[in-house]
Amino acid sequence: MDDKDLAISLKLYKQSLGKQRLTVKDSKRVPVEKGQFRVLLWEPWEYIMVVDVEEEGLVHAVPFTIWTELTTSGLRLKLHWLKRDRLFAPLPFMVYLRKEVVERESLLITKLKEETISTVLKNVRRTPNYSVNKYQRSFLKLVWKRFEDLSLSSVIYTHMLRERKESEQRGLIIQYPSHIIQKYQTQLQAYQLAAMESVALRGKNWLGVVEEGQIVIYLPKELEGKKIRIKLFDEVLYEGIGEEKIVLEGVPKEYSHEYMEEKLHVELLED
Amino acid sequence: MWSFWKIDPVHFKALLECGKLDDLIEKIYEKFWDLPTKHQFILIRYSKKKHLFPSAELIKKVFNVSEKSVYEFFKGKYKEFSFPVASSTNAEFVNALLIEDVQEVLTNVKEVKKHLKPIKEFVGKGFWIFFDREFSGASFQLPTVLELYVENMPSDVVFSGSVDKNGKIKTANRLEEKEN
């Protein structure tokens, strides 16, 4: 294809660009999976090959185009779709989309074989994302622009989700005050470490599990989100909003933890 | 009351096994279907092991089974086994707890419910089977049938495959991944 044809192709592509993004009916949505070749119902349609789906829902994909001469990749994928054979070519970059967006705005065309996925990925890695040809350059930029904001926001959103999940999994962290050991030594001595110490504890309104140097405390749902005070002996360890999971760190290992069942109190400060 | 489904499964197991939840067993079973699959498996295992159950009335209501089945569940022998399952991305072992000599068939994994009937038709008796994770497919049928038939199954052999109502063994899917 010479420059004249490339210029025409690029012009046609530019003319077809619009802002419409169609949504797939709930009943027709297909869960996104690795290896799927899908069509995004944008204006004009864009195509993606799903390379990976992270646990938190970030989809890694290689975009494909039907404007095969405008991309820098020489690889062609022939697929029978909508009653005829069609050629697709990959673009030399990856895009990142949220799983919900892919399921909402794209239809499944087919599932590709593992070998095809590997071939495409190898090709994408080796293909330059810069072209000496100005029409190809301009095309790559235009397609990237279509995915750019979505990719960036998808990555940030996933990062935020991951952070929130990690913090939820970890729970609220409070420290065991080291001076308690000296202050309440006489009382603590009654709790010598037994050979078979129970790893689980239960106080008046909390459940606990002893782990390496810490106790994971679970509060009943009546205390979640409410203002609470956690006291060990007469010391206040925490005063604030109660979370379902609280981690008490720095718990001394030299005594049995059973004293906690009597001495750790969780109080509701307001209803 | 605690949201038991929010408790880490390892912690849930520790709390149960240390007897810290014994007085709450009725409350936990009330929310049985809200619990994750792993928690359900841990709970049933604990109940069978310690012979600690909620009221028969509650079991009847929660599992929607006959009173006869409830008592069979209380008394019935149980076995544990594991089998491999594979998806397009990985292969893992699923643990199963099988309760024999029960009138109906019952499971905690919705996806495999439809595969219980051929087993019942072939072995001619009901059973309850609880798994520790969600999965799909019928490859649990062969190990289940064998556990129902054989008294002392060797523990160092795993089986995978589906079985029809006549006992004919079909090919297992994704054997290569399962071998790995």
Image (cartoon, coloured by chain):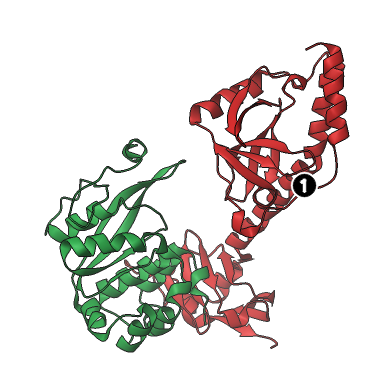
Q: Colour of chain A?
A: red
Q: Name the residue nearer the viewer: B25 or A261.
A: B25
Q: Quadrant of the rendered structure where residue B49 is?
A: bottom left
Chain with colour green in the figure? B
Residue B32 position within the rendered picture, expressed as x and y whole percent measured from the top left: 42, 75
**Residue A192 visible in the picture:** yes
Please report the residue visible at 27 percent of the width from the left and 50 percent of the height from the top: B162
Quadrant that contains the N terminus of chain A: top right
Q: Quadrant of the rendered structure where residue B123 is?
A: bottom left
Q: Is residue A83 left or right of residue A2?
A: left
Please report the residue visible at 62 percent of the width from the left and 50 percent of the height from the top: A57
Chain of the residue that carries numbered disc 1 in the rendered image: A
Residue B93 position within the rendered picture, expressed as x and y whole percent measured from the top left: 34, 49
Q: Is residue A113 left or right of residue B69?
A: right
Residue B43 position within the rendered picture, expressed as x and y whole percent measured from the top left: 36, 71
Q: Is residue A203 left or right of residue A15?
A: left
Residue B114 position within the rendered picture, expressed as x and y whole percent measured from the top left: 34, 62
Residue denoted by label 1: A153
Q: Amino acid at mark 1?
A: Ser
